[in-house]
Amino acid sequence: MNMMMASIIATIFFLIGGFQLNEKGIPLNNAYFYASKKECETMDKKPYFRQSGIAFTLIGIVFMLHSIELHLNTGWLMIVANVMLGIVIVYAIVSSVSLWKKRNL
């Protein structure tokens, strides 16, 4: 992947994250996609928008760090990007379990 492609991907993820955090469009979240039509109409979408917005923004940061690493060729920025990717994975799992527990109470 070259620097320009990583920058474009980062920008796309930042835009999607911004739209999600501003609650524009539909929540890009599995809980919303797998819910019945009736559930989608009545569910509180705010936590799903927030979760998706944060996840997309964090992924944008990962690609931004990757782009900067490709430009500067430092070596250590790739480690930071990989740690950030781990944070994204942990956040996605923890927040999904938390939302699931709140939904099923």
Image (tube, rainbow, N blue to C red):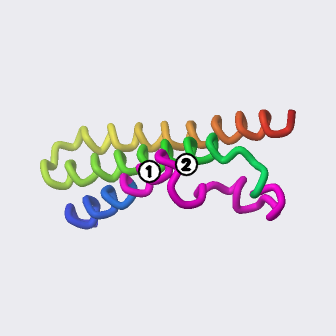
Residue in the picture at 32% in, 56% down: 10
How far across and how far down the image is residue 3, in percent?
20, 61
Q: Disc 1 to disc 2, how far (Cα)? A: 7 Å
Position of 43 with respect to 61 (left or right) is right
* Residue 17: assigned label: 1
Please tell me which residue lies in front, 38 or 88: 38
Q: From what the image shows, is residue 13 above or below residue 102? A: below
Q: Does the magenta stretch include residue 24?
A: yes
Camera-nearest residue between 78 and 30: 30
Q: What residue type is labelled 1?
A: Gly
Q: In which quarter of the image is residue 6?
A: bottom left
Q: Which residue is drawn at 78% across and 34% down?
A: 102
Residue 4, placed above or below residue 27:
below
Report whether 7 appears left or right of 105: left
- Compare marks 1 and 2 and give the one earlier in the sequence: 1
Query: Which amino acid type is shown beneath numbered disc 2?
Result: Ser
Work out whether 72 lies above or below 3: above
> For the residue carrying disc 1, how many other residues have a C-alpha within 10 Å: few (<14), some (14-19), or many (20+)?
many
Tell me whether circle 1 and circle 2 mark residues in contact (CB < 8 Å): yes
Which quadrant of the rendered structure holds the C terminus?
A: top right
How far across and down, in percent of the image, does residue 34 sit? 76, 61
Which residue is nearer to you in this view: 43 or 1? 43
Position above or below: 104 against 32: above
* Residue 72: % across, % down: 13, 48
Which residue is rendered at x = 24% and y = 54% of the image?
Answer: 67
Res 52 label: 2
Check if residue 44 falls in the magenta segment.
no
Is most of the magenta stretch helix, strand or loop?
Answer: helix
Q: Give the range drawn in magenta.
A: 14-40
